[in-house]
Amino acid sequence: MNDFFSQLYELFGSSYIEGFSNDLFNAGVYTSTGLATLAVTILGVIVFYLLKAQKPLTFRRTVWFIWTLVLCVFCFGIAYALAFSTLDGVYAELNQDLPYSFGNFTGFALINFLWAAVYCFITSLIVQLVCINTHGDVPFPFRKSLK
């Protein structure tokens, strides 16, 4: 599983950083971040559509984009916190200073932000396809509205 998520987070090798990526891989940060991001986005999108079924205000695309942005920002924070705390702990055990900068952790978190947006979009499509009461119009008209 670590191999799968490492490929996603390294953008299939294009954002591989020599020491940083190896440390993230060896510490299992890719898997924990990937699973946390999947859980947050899937649950967040399901909550959105449950609220949408009850509140007409959520029928607007703007609300969906805001909700997705909030989920992505939350996933950004998860990635940054997991990567920083895990690697800080690893290097603290070795009695060494953390050799990575704010930019390394922010870059990793930004990639997680992008993957969270992709997961939200895909989950939205799946929920609209599976559930009848979604009206199929957020984030875009996916099927004939049942209103």
Image (cartoon, rainbow, N blue to C red):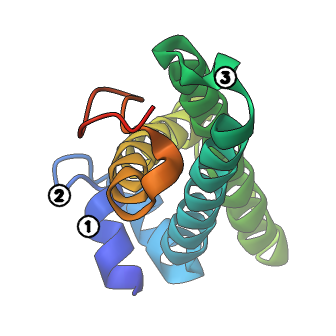
Seen from the viewer's position, the closer of residues 36 and 21 is 36
Residue 56, numbered label: 3
Q: Is residue 2 visible?
A: yes
State the CA–CA distance, disc 2 to disc 1: 7 Å
Q: Position of residue 51 (x, y in %)?
A: 72, 40
Contact? badges 2 and 1 (CB < 8 Å):
yes
Above or below, 86 relative to 63: below
Seen from the viewer's position, the closer of residues 35 and 99 is 35
Above or below, 4 relative to 17: below
Q: Position of residue 106 (x, y in %)?
A: 56, 34
SS class of the residue under badge 1?
A: helix
- The residue under label 1 is 7
Which of pointers 2 and 1 lies earlier in the amino acid sequence?
Answer: 1
Q: Badge 1: few (under 14), some or many (20 or more) residues near its Cα, within 10 Å?
A: some
Q: Is residue 98 visible?
A: no
Residue type (three-letter) at the residue carrying disc 1: Gln
* Residue shown at the point (37%, 42%) measured from the top left: 121
Answer with the quarter of the image where residue 95 lies: bottom right
Q: Is residue 98 left or right of residue 39?
A: right
Q: Position of residue 118 (x, y in %)?
A: 35, 45
Residue type (three-letter) at the residue carrying disc 3: Pro
- The residue under label 2 is 13
State the CA–CA distance, disc 3 to disc 2: 44 Å
Q: Badge 3: few (under 14), some or many (20 or more) residues near its Cα, within 10 Å?
A: few
Point out the frontmost of discs 3 and 2: 3
